Amino acid sequence: MPILVMKFGGTSVATLDRIRRAAKRVGREVANGYDVIVIVSAMAGETNKLVELVEETSHLYDAREYDAVVSSGEAVTAGLMALTLQEMDVPARSWQGWQVPLVTNSAHASARIEEIGTQHITAKFAEGMKVAVVAGFQGISPEGRITTLGRGGSDTTAVAFAAAFAAERCDIYTDVDGVYTTDPRVCDKARKLDRIAFEEMLELASLGAKVLQTRSVELAMKYKVRLRVLSSFEEQTDEAGTLVCDEEDVMEANAVAGVAYSKEEAKVTLVSVADRPGVSAAIFGPLAEAGVNVDMIVQNISEEGRTDMTFSCPVGQVARAAMAMNAAKDRGEINFHGLIADNEVAKVSIVGIGMRSHAGVAAKMFKALSDENINIKVITTSEIKISVLIERKYMELAVQALHDAFELHKAG
């Protein structure tokens, strides 16, 4: 039988009624001739409750025990889904990560998948089981300890299973009905895309779009897994949702596919840095060691042997960045006159594979922002992306202006 992977997020399994609704969707796919692997998240809110319990128990907690606790939410959902399917006379059983086994490395709370054993589930399908309900987000380390894949890890679990079992498709059911040109809560003209290329989805996910976890899109692109994002709250049709696929399968002609934003950004400037060979390594090495996620980097023109170095990072990591820089200065590794942090900025980006063949995209973006008197603080570009840092108070205006400028409300 062909295999289909169906993943249901926390809102889709938040109550027993929603689990029953999800199970009916699974039953329809079984009736259509598929063997189905269902990946489930914890019921909405459960993971947060479990994390709070761990943190109340111990501030300096053992990450291995943290994983043992927070992974239990998915195990509950998997059992409830299997029971619901059995009540519908659909042959099903639940699997935890270690039972599959889904083998990861030993990086607890942010583990990476290394291997998925297919033999046990394949054997059960051969015996007549129609649905394998797998607890997402969790695996087992080489040491035999339960691991978790980080927030949003059930998306990654689903794509990895689709790749391992050569599934026909991987359907991700969530509380939105697809991927939009931008956040509909910010721009009421946002349009649902029928298809989007892996590269575009990867950029949008990394830039703040919350529809899919970045690692899941990376995996899908690497293994050519056809992904479909669907709402679990709407009736399904052949045209439902958004298909994430290869570039050659995308029919949209727009230069820009979408506008993404991230509110929680900060701009950090090292003032008057001694400009010498190796200064960038001396700055960004300690930042990496401190776990600071640096994004945009701009270096001013050097004057009299000194320069300013500006970078962006999540606003919650500014204190860590400052500590790392001051420690490096105390060690004599870098020399600068001051550190200025601006915590009131936002990143707004446009993304589109069409940028490769369309001239003037950057000019149009900058003109749209200029027309709204929005000042750009930092700019970075890639082949299919342009990002700018602006004052946070102008973020929604910028998103709306760019959406209008590139006419994203119109189909390509």
Image (spheres, rainbow, N blue to C red):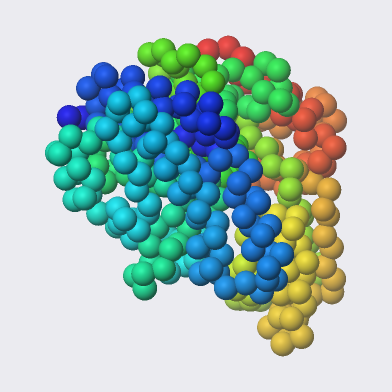
Q: Can residue 144 be seen in this view?
A: yes
Res 24 → quadrant? top left
Whole-percent x, y for residue 366 in the image: 71, 32
- The quarter in which the N terminus is drawn is top left
Whole-percent x, y for residue 334 in the image: 71, 79
Is 386 located above or below residue 405 in the figure? below
Q: Which residue is drawn at 82% across and 42% down?
A: 391
Whole-percent x, y for residue 197 in the image: 43, 31
Res 114 → quadrant? bottom left
Q: Which residue is drawn at 71% across and 25% down?
A: 185
- Pick whichever, 13 or 250, lies toward us: 13
Q: Which residue is drawn at 82% across and 26% down?
A: 372
Q: Is residue 35 left or right of residue 243?
A: left
Q: Residue at x 38, y 62 (%)?
A: 140
Q: Is residue 359 visible?
A: no
Q: In this view, does 193 lie to the left or right of 33?
A: right
Q: Furthest-left residue in view?
A: 126
Is 376 located above or below residue 3 in the figure? below
Whole-percent x, y for residue 122 in the image: 19, 44
- Pick whichever, 318 or 360, lies toward us: 318
- Pick whichever, 193 or 53, lies toward us: 53
Is 287 located above or below residue 372 in the figure? below
Q: Is residue 125 left or right of residue 244?
A: left
Q: Is residue 126 left or right of residue 334?
A: left
